[in-house]
């Protein structure tokens, strides 16, 4: 059944699959298609922070071997930042955790004063975190 009597029929001249009247064109909220968008975004943030913690901890030895002298202070800073990332990953339900994650990226880049490779890791993860924030903004609106 096609034509005006079918509620899902496309109007003449409209491309197939045009948005329904309840979408963004009608002023309604844009749906992401996810069952629980908040949970998905929290998982993205937690996964990003968990990956960052893992990379930080695994990077200690290669930095010491290849990159030269990594002081005890720098190793302590890396471990502290990794622990902070894991704690924040577990607290992503809190709205302030996103801001704290952003601050964590800045602290990691600041740790670049202790060793240049920490700044490089900080810059890489700051870009990844910026992308996670962008995805969060797109999904949650």
Image (spheres, helix red, strand yellow):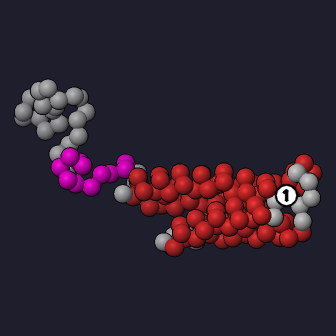
Compared to residue 5, the image places residue 70 above or below, namely below
Q: Is residue 47 visible?
A: no
Instruction: State the image coordinates of residue 130 (x, y, percent, origin top left).
Output: 54, 55
Instruction: State the image coordinates of residue 109 (x, y, percent, origin top left).
Output: 69, 61
Decide which of 106, 58 is in the foreground and name it.
Answer: 106
Helix, strand or loop under label 1: helix
Q: Is residue 8 left or right of residue 99?
A: left
Q: Is residue 60 visible?
A: yes
User: Residue 30 colored magenta?
Assistant: yes
Mark 1 nearby-residue class (10 Å; few <14, some 14–19, many ≥20): some
Taking the spot 11% from the left edge, 35% from the top edge, the residue there is: 6
Decide which of 8, 18 is in the foreground and name it.
Answer: 18
Q: Is residue 137 left or right of residue 45?
A: left
Taking the spot 90% from the left edge, 48% from the top edge, the residue there is: 66
Magenta stretch, main secondary structure class: loop
Q: Is residue 27 left or right of residue 71?
A: left
Instruction: State the image coordinates of residue 42 (x, y, percent, origin top left).
Output: 52, 61
Q: Which residues are magenta?
A: 23-33
Check disc 1 and report the residue beneath it.
Answer: 60
Residue that sits furthest to the front in the current view: 113
Decide which of 95, 107 is in the foreground and name it.
Answer: 107
Q: Quadrant of the C terminus?
A: bottom left
Marks counted in the figure total 1
Instruction: State the image coordinates of residue 1 (x, y, percent, origin top left).
Output: 12, 28
Taking the spot 47% from the left edge, 52% from the top edge, the residue there is: 135
Quarter of the view holding residue 129: bottom right
Q: Is residue 83 left or right of residue 75?
A: left
């Amino acid at each position: 059944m096609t034509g005006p009597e079918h509620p899902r029929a496309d109007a003449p001249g409209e491309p197939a699959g045009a948005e329904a009247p309840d979408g963004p064109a009608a002023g309604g909220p844009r749906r992401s298609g996810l069952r629980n968008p908040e949970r998905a975004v929290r998982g993205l943030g937690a996964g990003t922070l968990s990956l960052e913690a893992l990379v930080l901890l695994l990077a200690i030895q290669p930095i010491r071997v290849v990159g030269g002298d990594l002081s005890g202070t720098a190793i302590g800073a890396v471990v502290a930042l990794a622990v902070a990332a894991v704690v924040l990953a577990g607290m992503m339900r809190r709205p302030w955790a996103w801001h704290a994650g952003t601050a964590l990226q800045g602290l990691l880049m600041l740790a670049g004063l202790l060793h240049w490779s920490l700044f490089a890791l900080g810059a890489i993860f700051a870009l990844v975190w910026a992308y996670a924030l962008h995805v969060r903004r797109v999904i949650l609106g």
